[in-house]
Amino acid sequence: MKQSFGVKLPGTVPRWAATYRDVPDLVVEFERIGFDDVVDGEHILFTPVMHHPGGAGNMVHGRDTQHSDRADTLVTFAAAAAKTTTIKFVSCVLLPAAHGFAVLARQASTLDVISGGRFALGVGMGWDAAEFEAQGIPANERDARAEDVIRACMQLWQPGLSSYHGRWIRFDDVISEPAPSTAGGPAVWWGGNAIKGPTARRVAEFCAGWLSREAAEYDEIARSIESIRTKCLELGRDPATVSYRCSLTPTGWQAPPLVDDLIDAAVASGQRLGGLGITNFTVPLNYYQLDLDALQRLLKALRAA
């Protein structure tokens, strides 16, 4: 397949990275194997039990036994970018509503500079309402606030003095440093169901691409892509200029226990989704539980299909 292929960071899992200090070395291995990019997303606060939508599993956290396996996405990417040369970094997704716009703009620019333009800022609303409420952010505002933050960031990435007047954010004649390595700032991708709501409009209006939900089923992906293409035509944008990314998560199919069967199933899933126009795939390492040798075999099979 001609698509781009990335792999999602598994967090700190002993078979891949025993501690977060080992994660940049794991990314070096992903680069050696031949992946185009590495993907990571964030939760900023965790409730004791988090019921992931779409059947992707529940997360249980506690202080009796500390087993933190997640860290800050942008800081992790910066550490890995300094040790690599070709692999790209995609946040999938960051939660802009929970970030101060000026700090996020500066962090993203800094990562863009450190990586030499190898960073794409994937963002979304976030599914866990309690995570936002705990930060004093009304959950029903998090989607609109996310757009306000990203539009402000995009203004700060422009050369010269920047001004922006949004619903919650307003500033005039300021400069954010450092200037990004990429002209206009890192590419922005918007994530989430695009069948209804503002996601399709955002993607068509100011984003480089769309990110499906990790647990999205085929029909949701197909209808979201169609919605985005329709919105592009309404706004006068060529739909072919939008990229589409989804995870090869075993949603709607069971991950086989044998490596060869898993590879065959992942390739078949990729071919089916590729027919919809998917341009970028993510291999969900936590779901597949493959060692690096098997992961390389999977990547070769995907590229050869």
Image (cartoon, rainbow, N blue to C red):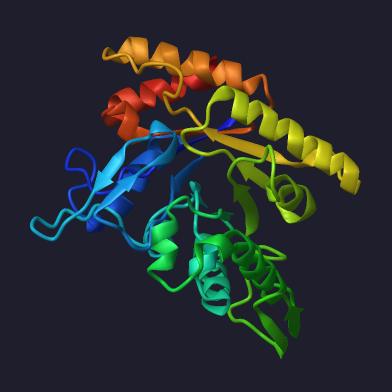
Compared across the picture, whether 81 is left or right of 45 comes to right
Q: Position of residue 109 (x, y in %)?
A: 57, 70
Q: Is residue 37 visible?
A: yes
**134 relative to 41, above or below:** below
Compared across the picture, whether 49 is left or right of 129 comes to left
Compared across the picture, whether 287 is left or right of 66 comes to right
Q: Is residue 1 visible?
A: no
Q: Position of residue 152 (x, y in %)?
A: 67, 73
**144 relative to 25, above or below:** below
Compared across the picture, whether 290 is left or right of 133 comes to left
Quarter occupied by residue 240: top right
Quarter occupied by residue 66: bottom left
Task: Tell me the residue at 46%/33% (across/down).
Answer: 215
**192 relative to 173, above or below:** above
Task: Tell me the residue at 24%/55% (across/down).
Answer: 48
Which quarter of the rendered picture does the N terminus lie within? top right
Q: Which is nearer the eye, 295 or 240? A: 240
Which quarter of the rendered picture does the C terminus lie within? top right
